[in-house]
Amino acid sequence: MKKKIVLIVFVGLFVGIFQQVLSSAPAFARKYRMSCKTCHNPFPRLKPFGEEFAANGFVLEEQQAPRYFVKTGDEDLSLIRNLPLAFRIEGHMIYDNEGKDKFDFATPYLIKLVSGGTLAKNIAYYFYFFFSERGEVAGLEDAFLYFSDLFGSGISVAIGQFAVSDPLFKSELRLTYENYRIYKVKPGNSKIDLVYDRGVTISYGLKTGTDLTLEILNGNGIDEADFFKNFDSDKYKNVFGRISQDMGDNFRIGAFGYLGKEEQEGEVNSVWMAGVDGTFTSTNLELNIQYMEREDDNPFFLAGNTVDYRIKGGFAELLYFPRGDDSKWYSAALFNWIDYGGLRNEFQSLSFHLGLLLRRNVRLVGEVTYVFKDLNEKYTRFGLGLITAI
């Protein structure tokens, strides 16, 4: 029996397989004939240059040439010569996921089409479509138009659907299989969280290293429209605000606030969230820390409810690159913590991740996650993966 357990653990650690394609389409590398290393270290994690490239509408001004657009004879028409496309295919074989004490062939886990590019000067688009996610056609998540340097004001605007938490830390660009769990918390029957929603994002950067972001949101996620073709399920609009400040070349601090309401069956839930975060970077290390609190006054939408529900939590993520941008391997650790304030038991987990770059666009990874607390359960998840960008 002991030999069987050891074998299961060994196989779970070294055989769980999945594949995925870089969320920021590798068509950009083909278009500009540059290495993925220019923007990523390693993919899909963005370097400062990659963040600047995305903020500029996926354009390198000094390399942008008319040959990337079809000549139609109409100066007011911009048609991309080759539509940038990429695919992400992900499959898993995981042992002891969510404490189930078994192997699961989750293949394919998702199949995703990614596209993004420049439509015209200072206008870009980005989206990805799930052909399949966990066995269902999931549809769109990120899907927006992006206007950079609007009317020469320095203000950028994104309209569509996106992750509310993108100005904090982008979960789509994380290196670990384990996610930033605090962003997905929704107490009771609430539909408000910090993942995907529809709305508008307005951002502005000052020369002092200060970045300002404002989001105006529906506040009910990205479910389908109702019978009357309305996406917003109530009359309220919610607001997310963010400020961050560079403190020299290696340290950044930030704070955010979220204020909103939602209505179900005639009952209203008022929500506020607030948090702080910080990032420290050096040639070899990156440390990301997020802490936030959330309060709902009626997440179960009960008549006459007067009880406030407070949740707090966050994460700490440490990345190590032994040779900086030239590292062929790296490691990561991620600690998640959520205190549900009496709604359910506390959650704590710690993940260890190791990655090896076989090529700039091929990454072999292994990960172990130990869950200390989850509904009074403890368990360990093992997996090994192969990540490719096509």
Image (cartoon, rainbow, N blue to C red):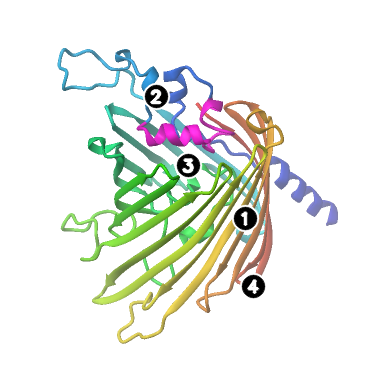
Residue span colored magenta: 36-57
Tag of residue 143: none
- Label 4 or label 1, whichever comes before in sequence order: 1
- State the image quarter where residue 223 is shown: bottom left
Label 3 element class:
strand
Percent across and percent down for residue 32 are 44, 19
Which residue is the site of mark 3? Answer: 110
Give the residue at mark 4. Answer: 376
Task: Decide which of tag 1 and tag 2 comes sooner along the chain.
Answer: 2
Query: Would residue 4 be found to the left or right of residue 375 on screen?
Result: right
The mark that comes first in sequence, 3 or 1, is: 1
Which of 226 and 25 lies nearest the eye of the viewer? 25
Camera-nearest label, 4 or 1 = 4
Q: CA distance from mark 2 to mark 4?
A: 52 Å
Residue tagged by mark 2? 60
Residue located at (53% from left, 58% from top): 181
Residue 97, numbered label: 1
Q: Is residue 257 above or below residue 250?
A: below
Q: Work out how far the residue at label 3 is from the one at label 1, CA to CA, in angstroms.
A: 17 Å
- When the figure is inspected, residue 105 is found, relative to residue 256, above or below; the finding is above
Q: Amino acid at mark 4?
A: Asn
